[in-house]
Image (tube, rainbow, N blue to C red):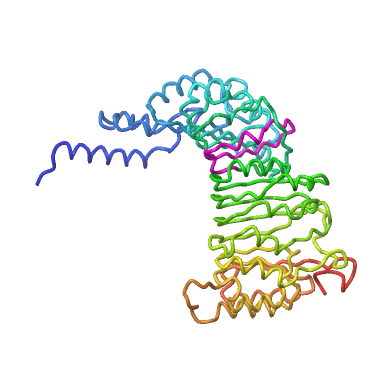
Amino acid sequence: MPLLASTRAFAVCQILQAIVSCSVEDRISFPFRRDFRLQLMLVSQDWLNTVLSEEFWSRYCFMAVPFTDGVRQLDILRCFIPRSGSNLLTFHFLPDYNRLRADPSNPDMYFGAGIIDILQDIILPYASRIRFLQCLLPTTQLVDMLRRIPEGALQSLEVADFACIHSFFHPRTLVRCQQSRNFTAFKSLPRLKTVRLYINSQLRVVNFWLLSIPSLTKLDVGNFVLPPDIFMGIMTGLKGVLRVGLFTVQFDAQSCYLAHLLDQVIMTSLEVLLIRFIDLFHWPTFPKLLFLPVAQEVRIERSDRIANPEWNVAMYASIFPVPSTTLRELVLSTYPFRLSANPVHVRKKRRRTSYSELEALLLVLPNLVKLALPPEIYVHIETFAKIAGRELLPKCEVLQIATDVDPNVVLAMVGSRNWAPDPTPSNLARITALTLTLPMTYAPTDQQIKNAMASFGLGQGSFSLHYIATCSGGKGHCCFGL
């Protein structure tokens, strides 16, 4: 039975659209030189009609490469955008990464430097239709732009990604936040769901209270240092909607006086939390103010000015339900406050984590697939035995741990799990990746350990071995190298 003419026409249209989608770049690049869309439009009337479909004219990328024909570039943009019809727009303002590496301090590393005003000429004329806005710009231009965006201008904005390109080479540079009445870019935006804001700047313009937007589901402000009260204010405002959060919180000697003013916040939607605590020793129980009933991935990093921060391991069990059936990945890590910080910990200044404390945490997390612990959290031989028998971490596949027990104990644990018959039930897991930190005294046996791990299925790429030197205090005082 022959196809109806209307059916044939629809099929041809769909086929042409698929061909065009595969043939042209997803985004139209500026400064504009050529684009395959214009060539396809010359093939026939059918091709012209297909290429002029709104979907092919709604995404633009503005690269920071030099050009002098600014007026012509804006004329081309003003010609192209009407072809997107009523479709929402996507704008990317990106650096030239080759130029950025060669000259990272160049203040003109942005589109149209000196000849085009990105905000006035490109963003604001189409502000009500922009759905996705990514601006990777030098600090001065980025901060100036954020200050000049009128309140509520970006009515259709769903994803905002603003980053200072100079922080690419200094990703851990931290910026203190300060409230500013001039900062209204994120106010009155009903559709905003995702914000990433990385500004390596001393201008300190960000008012974080404005980021407690009722519809916000993802917030990445990890390089801004938040005091604990502002952080808790944000979490309270977003407790029912935030799904992904990246934060840095710093404490001082006065922080603990806020304890009686702040209540625990239950984050009913938060699935991924990456948080760095600076000087948590001033308020060591602060993490208990968050309760994470549906968390799937949690990464907690400590950066303390004191030499030997102490992890209250059992306390972290209280931030999850008992048991936590959703958590799949838990990473606890220590980032040295100074590059010269001694990574080895003197016993007479701190105590070891007991095996019962660590096991209290692990028992709450039966579905963990990945666990990473810093050297400060010591893993005892008793705990290894329970991991080997799957009494603890029955579904864990990836481990990152530190210990000074005989490496043969670790080998026995891995062998017990990986050489055993297929586990029952089948969702119990073998170890597929292991990062192990040992005292330097075991360095001479490096190759033997690697060979043994390879025999258990952990070869190069899935097994990593690191060593920590004993401290100068001598044998018997260091947690490692006894």
Expressed as whole percent of the image width and height from the top left, the position of residue 313 reads: 71, 63
Expressed as whole percent of the image width and height from the top left, the position of residue 7 reads: 18, 40
Q: Is residue 121 left or right of residue 291?
A: left
Expressed as whole percent of the image width and height from the top left, the position of residue 393 reads: 59, 70
Q: Residue at 56% of width from left, 61% of height from top?
A: 328
The C terminus, quarter of image = bottom right
Q: Is residue 150 above or below residue 418?
A: above
Q: Which residues are magenta?
A: 193-219
Q: Is residue 469 left or right of residue 88?
A: right
Q: Nearer the viewer, residue 427 or 33?
A: 427
Q: Nearer the viewer, residue 468 or 444?
A: 468
Image quadrant of residue 19? Answer: top left
Q: Is residue 216 magenta?
A: yes
Q: Is residue 17 magenta?
A: no
Q: Nearer the viewer, residue 148 or 288?
A: 288
Outermost residue to the top:
71
Outermost residue to the front:
260
Residue 452 seen in render: no
Q: Is residue 441 above or below residue 349?
A: below
In this figure, what is the number of numbered marks? Answer: 0
Expressed as whole percent of the image width and height from the top left, the position of residue 280 reads: 76, 52
Q: Is residue 477 left or right of residue 260?
A: right
Q: Residue at 55% of width from left, 45% of height from top?
A: 240
Outermost residue to the right:
473
Q: Residue at 29% of width from left, 29% of height from top?
A: 49
Q: Is residue 131 left or right of residue 338?
A: left
Residue 412 seen in render: yes
Q: Is residue 98 above or below residue 306?
A: above
